[in-house]
Amino acid sequence: MAKILIVGCGQLGMPLAHLLSEQGHQVTGLKRHPPKAADRQLRYLSADLAKPESLAGLPTDFDWVYFIVSPDGRGNVQSYQDVYGTGLTQLLGLFAKAASTPRWIFVSSTSVYGQTQGEWVDEASATQPTEPSSQLIKQAEQQVLAANPGNIVVRFSGIYGPGREYLLRLAQTTPAIQHTPPYYTNRIHQDDCVAVLAFLLARGLAGDSLAPCYLASDDDPAPQWEVIAWIAAQMHCPTPTMRDLEGVTMNKRCRNQQLKALGYPFIYPSYKDGYKPMIDAYLAQAY
């Protein structure tokens, strides 16, 4: 049994916390607004990474720390600075001051890759993001890895799943989608995100040698046109219209071989596997 702190108990952190608790671990969740209802499985601590003073007195006697934060809005650079800069630095400093060295699993993003020509990328590929928010995430990765050689970065691609039905709604609008040359998209189901994070912990506790970074994306990087056209057909909507390629800041194909070589079996290896039950549920609610 491990004593675990999960920083950020949202759509990924909360189900992960319950899964690890069910596996016998002692789990504490750090959250800005802990649930008011009692949760017998978990202990919650209230803190806001954007307000470092709220971290004062945080226990540091953990074996593992997950950092799974969600800035307030993708375009809110200040929010990214608050959590990936100020908040992370303060949190790492608390553990360093206490001479506590838990292993961290830091949830990052494939947005740290800046490739734009549909190249294949993996853990060894150059990370040269142009977006300020992605640059802050990259800096945070480096800070976490520098703090402890046993720390791990997990780069998730586009997360989807129940509650994340944007593409389903988009497909209903007969959108104009880039067709030629292909604009590649990468994704991972949120159930796989949770499972990957639990899997890496299990491998670490078993004494396996883990790499400092894992790219977590499904087996099927696919052109945006293909994905939206397939979803539209499943939902009995018109086929999207074509548009010319506009300037893009990211266009790559993510390779997950390092994670699979470690033994992780994807629950949803393709977007079709993951979106089909979502579409069925969505249509059932509509009718």
Image (tube, grey):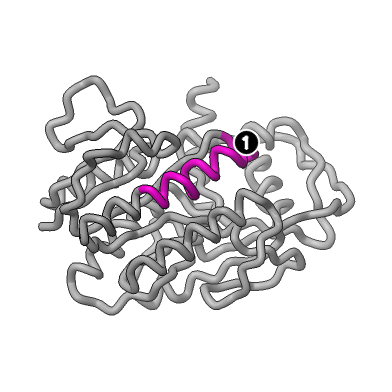
- Quadrant of the rendered image containing residue 232: top right
User: Callout 1, which amino acid?
Assistant: Met
Residue 277 seen in render: no
Question: Is the magenta region chiefly helix, strand or loop?
Answer: helix
Q: Which residue is more in the foreground, 62 or 170?
A: 62
Residue at the far front: name it: 97
Residue 279: horizontal and vertical position, in percent? 53, 37
- Label 1 Cα crowd, 10 Å radius (few <14 / some 14-19 / many 20+): some
Per the image, the residue denoted by label 1 is 235
Q: In this view, does 149 lie to the left or right of 237?
A: left
Residue at image coords 49%, 27%: 284
Residue 207: horizontal and vertical position, in percent? 19, 75
Residue at image coords 89%, 51%: 244
Q: Quadrant of the N terminus?
A: bottom left
- Quadrant of the rendered image containing residue 147: bottom left
Is 80 covered by the magenta stretch?
A: yes
Residue at image coords 58%, 35%: 73
Residue 1 seen in render: yes
Is 87 covered by the magenta stretch?
A: yes
Q: Which residue is more in the foreground, 31 or 123?
A: 31
Q: In this view, does 27 lie to the left or right of 109?
A: left
Residue 215: horizontal and vertical position, in percent? 48, 66
Q: In this view, does 8 lie to the left or right of 168?
A: left
Q: Is mark 1 on a helix, strand or loop?
A: loop
Q: In this view, does 6 lie to the left or right of 69?
A: left
Range of residues picked out in magenta:
73-90
Q: Which residue is more in the foreground, 17 or 83?
A: 83
Residue at image coords 43%, 47%: 190
